[in-house]
Image (spheres, helix red, strand yellow):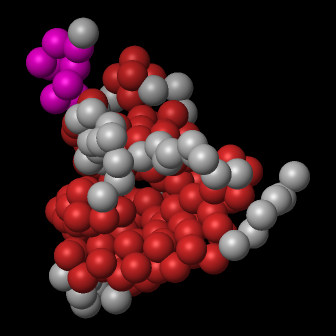
Amino acid sequence: MENRKTKITKKLIEESFLELLDAMPLSKIKIKDICINADVNRSTFYDYYHSIDQLLSEIENGVLQSIPAFETQPDNYDSRIFLNMLEKYFIFVKNNERLFRLLVVRSERDEFLKKLVDTVLKKYPTDYSGKNPATIRYCYVYCVNGVAGIVKEWIEKNFSLPPVKVAELCLKMSVKATEGAESITDLE
C-alpha cells in the first residue's frame, strides 16, 4: 500500500508527463524533462518507474481499471440494460477527455486502443450459449473494435453528440452486426 507522500509524488510525476505529452510527441519526452517539470530529482522518478514506458503503462492501466462495468453480470443482456452501461462508458470517456484524447487520438502508438478493446471484452463478457461460439466471438470482437473507432471519432469531433446518442448508435450497429452474424451457420 502506498503512503500519502508516495501517492502525491507519483501524481506529480504523472501530471508532469501528461502535460509534456499534451505539448509534444511521446518520442521527444525525456525523463529529465518530466523531472524538471515535476520539480523532482531523477532518482525520485526511478524510485517509482524504471522507464517512461512503465509510467505510461501505469497511467493506461489506471484508466482501464476505472472503466465502468456491471457489478454482477446480468442474466440476460436486455437492450435497455446494455444501453445504460454503454451510456456510462461514454460518460466516463467524456469525463476523462484529456486522458482519452492523449491516449487514443494523439498517441503515436495504438497500444492503448488494443488494451481498451481487450479490457472491454473482459469487462463485458458475452453469452455464447445456443450459438456458434466462434461466430459470436468474431462478431463481438468486430463490435468492440467498432466502438473503439467510434470513441476515437467522437473525441476528434469534440463530443458532437451526447453520450446517450453515441451509446444508442453503438447499440443499434451492434445489433445489426449480430443479426448478420447469426445468419452465418459455421465458421469452423
Residue 153 left/right relative to 138: left
Decide: is 120 above or below 162.
Answer: above
User: How many marks overall?
Assistant: 0
Residue at left 57%, top 59%? Answer: 140
Viewer-side residue, 121 vs 49: 121
Residue 133 in view of the camera: yes
Q: Position of residue 5 (x, y in %)?
A: 15, 19
Residue at left 52%, top 79%? Answer: 176
Q: Position of residue 34 (x, y in %)?
A: 38, 45
List the single residue furthest toward the left: 4
Decide: is 127 above or below 184.
Answer: above
Q: Position of residue 132 (x, y in %)?
A: 70, 51
List the single residue furthest toward the top: 1
Viewer-side residue, 154 vs 46: 154
Location of residue 1 by image quarter: top left
Residue at left 77%, top 64%? Answer: 185
Q: Which residues are magenta?
A: 2-9
Residue at left 39%, top 22%? Answer: 48
Q: Main secondary structure of the magenta part?
A: helix
Residue 74 left/right relative to 113: left
Q: Position of residue 122 (x, y in %)?
A: 49, 40
122 drawn magenta: no
Viewer-side residue, 146 vs 5: 146
Decide: is 77 above or below 70.
Answer: below
List the single residue furthest toward the right: 188
Residue 30 left/right relative to 18: right
